[in-house]
Image (cartoon, helix red, strand yellow):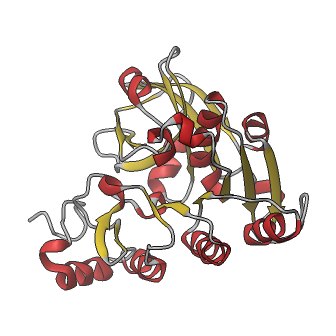
Amino acid sequence: MYIITRRKMLNESIVLCDVKAPRVARTCLPGQFVIVKTDEKGERIPLTICDYDREQETVTIVFQIVGASTYKMAQLKEGDGFQDFTGPLGRPSDLCLMPLEQLKKKQIVFVAGGVGAAPVYPQVKWLKEQGVPSDVIMGARSKDILILEEEMKQVAENLYITTDDGSYVRKGLVTDVLRDLVADQGKNYDHCVAIGPLIMMKFVSLLTKELQIPTVVSMNPIMVDGTGMCGACRVTVGGQVRFACVDGPEFDGHLLNFDEAIKRQQIYRTEEGRAYLKAKEGDTHHGGCGNCGGEQ
């Protein structure tokens, strides 16, 4: 068992847990993810690593209650545990692999939407530990669902917050803030990382392409199986088929086909849709999620 050492409700539907997972904590890097299972019959849930403590041998995960499996996870208390906690999976953030001398020359901005603040946080924290400052834009529909504000303040050079309904700090979208920072405040960014809902990342990427800011997006929102078998996270990047869980989750936002990814995410939610994708994509679909029959 992988014991929960800390549990905290960030709001009424988002839960943070520190989990004792020594091997994962020793080797993980920002950008990677884990797969958790509550018990033998539990669903395998891919979750981005929000933080880690190598000395305490813990990994922090954040998840939103959106269905039966995540509801069951939310009922676990400190002292309870997960049966499986597999990782680290996926590729680390490209920032972690960049030579430090090159990294220190970059002007970096992160754009986090909703629960996307969770995978943004470890990257910003890691950069601060390397002596590299970065700006962060955090957006949420309203103040009550904004998460990790205080934690982000501790690691970001500048934190800009916006809410769709204007209930906190300012009213507007994250793209409004980014355009304002560049066009009106004279910020000069040469690297952007955007993580959040697909539609948010699409419009951030459209804006940064206009502003000529190279942009990385994380496709963790579309992962299901997490091993490259089920085909749910299949994306097209620069005309090439990729799988977010093994080739990513981060990709060039200016090359990724967002319209296809958004449509695919909607289709994959139904049994009929999964069967359609399997028939359409043939051998390139993969299989093994237990839903589409591709493993048979």
Q: Residue at x 30, y 66 (%)?
A: 242
Q: Quadrant of residue 243?
A: bottom left
Q: Nearer the viewer, residue 86 or 190?
A: 190
> At 46% from the left edge and 57% from the top edge, which residue is drawn?
220
Q: Where 5 falls versus 60 (above or below)?
A: above
Left-right relation of 32 to 215:
left
* Res 267 → quadrant: bottom left
The location of residue 61, given as percent across then percent down, is: 53, 39
State whether residue 175 is above or below residue 137.
below
Which residue corresponds to the image point at 25% horizontal and 57% vertical from the top-left?
A: 228
Q: 71 and 28: which one is in front?
A: 28
Counting labels gives 0
Residue 145: tell me if it is visible: yes
Image coordinates of residue 90 in percent, x first then y, are 36, 47
Q: Quadrant of the N terminus?
A: top left
Quarter of the image that includes the C terminus: bottom left
Horizontally, residue 133 falls left or right of residue 269, namely: right
**Residue 61 shows in this picture:** no
Give the residue at the far top of this rendering: 55
**x and y percent of residue 264 in the render?**
39, 78
The residue located at (57%, 54%) in the rendering is 65
Tell me where residue 180 appears, x and y as whole percent. 84, 69
